[in-house]
Image: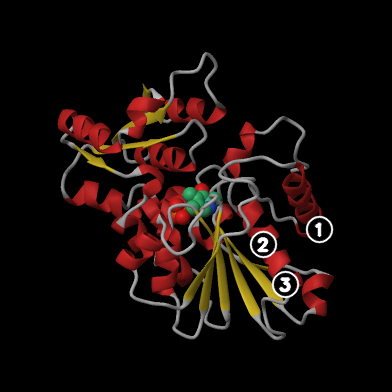
Amino acid sequence: MKESIPLVDLSKAILQPLKDPVFANANITVDVLRLDQIHPVISGNKWFKLKYSLIKVRDEGLDGIITQGGAYSNHLLATAFACHGPGLKCIGLIRGEEPKVLSPTLLDLQQLGMQLEFINREEYRQKDQLKFSWTQKHSNLLWVEEGGQGKLGVLGSEEILDLVNTSEFSHILCAVGTGTMLAGIINGSKENQKVVGITVLKISDPKNNDIEAFLQKHTNKKNYEIKYEFHEGGYAKINSSLLQFMNDIYSRSCVPTDFVYTGKLMKAVYELVITDYFQAGTRVLVIHSGGLQGNRSLEPGSLVF
Ligand SMILES: *Cc1c(COP(=O)(O)O)cnc(C)c1O
């Protein structure tokens, strides 16, 4: 998708050292890979997860993409944006009835030319049926799973670690929703690096769950660990200590985070350092996966940035 690539600026994905006495005292360095900076709106990792779907649309001569998500979905916004540039058709199946007032994200989607189709929650839950009926109706569109999950998403995420020289880091940390980005990062990592995924969903069985099953299927490496205890109450749950933490870290380091993914990730980094998870001398790389637009669902004034 040559036409659409200039819309994001990968040279802005810099490494930012995170200075804090907590890290210095433990003799640990922490650097943040700022994927959030590649575009003011489009979410960092979602761009990578979509790349090969866009290439498939082009190579197979399809008309565009059909996909699904919630009213604040980073994935839907990234998809609408990516289709808008090259003039591809794009349909978004939105979870829930059409609201009286559209969320800022839904308004953006509309403006970017995405056709919004509101699906009630019961129908939305019948994933296979939903996919079947909509792909039958639109065989000229590529079906992309919710959140950009799947093989092509993993393939694109494998390129994240290529952006900067990451070979000197011993640990790489990222937030985990579906595990697609995590699988790509594991595949792109070196054997002597450890990849640590921080789940943002509340998962009851750490051995047997969708993320582990996804990783079994999409990576051959074992140099990873998933941490399940940093979900802060569950997916997209808001709590004041998390918001306070996000404000603090922004004030100290100018790193903006979102309350669904990267806020929990950064909080986990601090807690892991404080509880001596890392040995002295460890060099930690944190992947800032973007997603800041989701903060628009918060009460105005909740955040200082
Ligand atoms: C979607 C998203 C994730 C989760 O990615 P998965 O590949 O689904 O695990 C992490 N961070 C941000 C900012 C996201 O938008």
Q: Which residue is mark 2?
A: 268
**Closer to the N terminus: mark 1 or mark 3?**
1
Residue 180: x, y in percent? Answer: 40, 58
Q: Amino acid at mark 3?
A: Val
Label annotation for residue 252: 1
The answer to whether 293 is drawn above or below residue 35 in the figure is above
User: Residue at horizontal 61%, vertical 52%?
Assistant: 231
Q: Judge depth for marks 2 and 1 and give the one in front.
A: 2
Residue contact at pointers 2 and 1, CB within 8 angstroms: no
* C-alpha span from label 2 to label 1: 17 Å
**Closer to the N terminus: mark 2 or mark 1?**
1
- Specify few, some or many for label 1: CA neighbours under 10 Å numbering under 14, 14-19, or 20 or more: few
User: Residue at horizontal 45%, vertical 81%?
Assistant: 190
**Closer to the N terminus: mark 2 or mark 3?**
2
Residue 199: x, y in percent? Answer: 54, 57
Horizontal placement of 150 versus 97: left or right? left
Q: Is residue 234 visible?
A: yes
Residue contact at pointers 1 and 3, CB within 8 angstroms: no
Label annotation for residue 273: 3
Residue 204: x, y in percent? Answer: 51, 54
Q: Is residue 165 visible?
A: no
Q: Amino acid at mark 1?
A: Arg
